[in-house]
Amino acid sequence: MPKGIATVLALALSLLAALPAAAREEKARQDCLNDRTKSEERITACTRYLRAGQPTVDEQVAALAARGEAFRDLKRYDEALADFDGAIALQPDKAFLYQKRGLTQDWKGDDEAALADYDRAIALDPDDAWSYYARGSVLKQLKRLDEALEAFDRALAVSPDYLTALRARGDTNRQRKDWGAARDDYNRVLALRPYSDYDYNLRGEVHEHLARPFDAARDYLISLRLYPNSDQVQWKLDDLGVDIHRATETPSRDFTFAPPPVGLAIVYLQQEVTPESQVEVDPMEEAIGELASWFAGPKEVPLPLSSIFITRQVTATEGRMVTLDNAVSFPASDAATRMTDRAKDYLDGLWPASFPTPQGEGAAIEYDEAALAQLWTRAPGKGASGTGKVVVHCPPEGVQPDLIAAVVGCQPEQTVEIGSLTWSAKVEGWQAILTPAGRFPALRLRYEESATLTLMGQTKTRTAVTTWWWSPDVHWWVKRKVEKDGKIEVSEAVSIRR
């Protein structure tokens, strides 16, 4: 074989042999730098990557830091520190390396070494809020509370909505017995994360120390609504000594219609729940169940399927029509998304009169108002029934129709009927109820509806049963339960602003 051909073949064979090695090296690099790789596998991958080839300084630092994290997760702290030391020797000006080594020192229990590393990280990058938070956490463990508070203040000066630092500062203020400051911190935490049962529990404890037992009870109740299986929170509520379960005397007189005051704003916690969580237990059965739980363990209540806070504010009243602004907080993230719309209700918020869309008027429900008026004066046993229709009021010429108006083919200023309903309602009687907003004597009303709606050639029929608890003190409902399509939705007043 000619020498030139032999040389080419040898080179080709060496390249082919190098391909699997390069692929293995790349696989090791990916597994090393992926924090989802299991710790033992990550250590192996990083070691292989560091030994193979000639990684650059940046690549060596990244691999050493990754392997150090894996050792730390396995509580092999000395090996983790050795890797972080090696990374820092290569790049001593990287703040994140001191953060990682400081956290390892913290986990190992060497508080002073951790503080030294966090101080170095702050010096290198004073705009990183985490370093201040981590430093404050160590100082808090050491009971150096004033210094811890200063560190959390600096973290929040850099990042005002840093949730973990806010909660840590609240905890520090609790330890310092600065209850007012602690409450302010938990208020901010809950503004950012309004669906946290844990933080309502913490704020409830602070309210107890502030001698505000009803506020504490409210927080514990919301915490239990969000997570009903916390025995600890239930015990705190029971031990408060606040007679929140005592039946309120029910009024002896009937009530005529009076519109709610403009400006009234009620925040509701609206939850979709399972039928099992709504079963009412006889007191004797409950006592037997509690006795049985000593032997078999407590029976857990099904958790809510979803939770949202809705604020309904009265903006205008005209006759028996009430105009509302609704603001909805969705638990999509710690910084709750806000959605607002405007609606109109008949009477006292019990019968919706319109369903606006973001683009326009949407659909409206027109009831036989004479039939609705039969329920006034409010009196136990009083009932009424009637019909209604669902209509779309088309906008005038030159006004862009909203989605619903466009779907039904609106002509200017035309009214299009798209559905009908039959309903019956009854005032069942007085009931003293407890909500997170307080105790209320309430009239319980039951409403049954069967509705048919036709859109785009499709007709749908649904039935629903709604129970309202209407408070004469508020001139509005404080609790509502809707049962439809096999689902149950419960709304309870959380706070009331007049």
Image (cartoon, grey):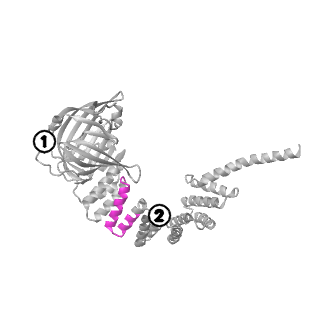
Instruction: Residue 307: give x, y in percent of width and height.
Output: 35, 47
Main SS of the magenta part reads: helix
State the extent of the magenta-drawn residues as a range: 168-195
Q: Quadrant of the N terminus?
A: top right
> Residue at (63%, 66%) from the top-left corner?
90
Whether residue 299 can be seen here? no
Q: Is residue 346 left or right of residue 230?
A: left
> Residue at (63%, 58%) from the top-left corner?
59
Q: Is residue 327 left or right of residue 377?
A: right
Res 129 label: 2
Instruction: Residue 435: give x, y in percent of width and height.
Output: 25, 51
Question: The disc labelled 2 sits on which kind of residue?
Answer: Ala
Q: Hey, which quadrant is residue 237 in on the image?
A: bottom left
Q: Hey, which quadrant is residue 243 in on the image?
A: bottom left
Crowdedness of circle 1 by 10 Å Cα count: few (<14), some, many (20+)?
Answer: few
- Exactly how many numbered labels are in the figure? 2
Res 94 label: none
Secondary structure found at label 2: helix
Secondary structure found at label 1: loop
Q: Is residue 386 highlighted in magenta?
A: no
Q: Is residue 161 left or right of residue 379?
A: right
Whether residue 68 can be seen here? yes
Q: Quadrant of the C terminus?
A: bottom left
Question: The disc labelled 1 sits on which kind of residue?
Answer: Thr
Crowdedness of circle 2 by 10 Å Cα count: few (<14), some, many (20+)?
Answer: many
> Residue at (20%, 53%) from the top-left corner?
246
Is residue 87 placed above or below 307 in the rendered structure?
Answer: below
Question: Can you identify the residue that label 1 sits on?
Answer: 377
> In the depicted view, which residue is nearer to us: 423 or 343?
343
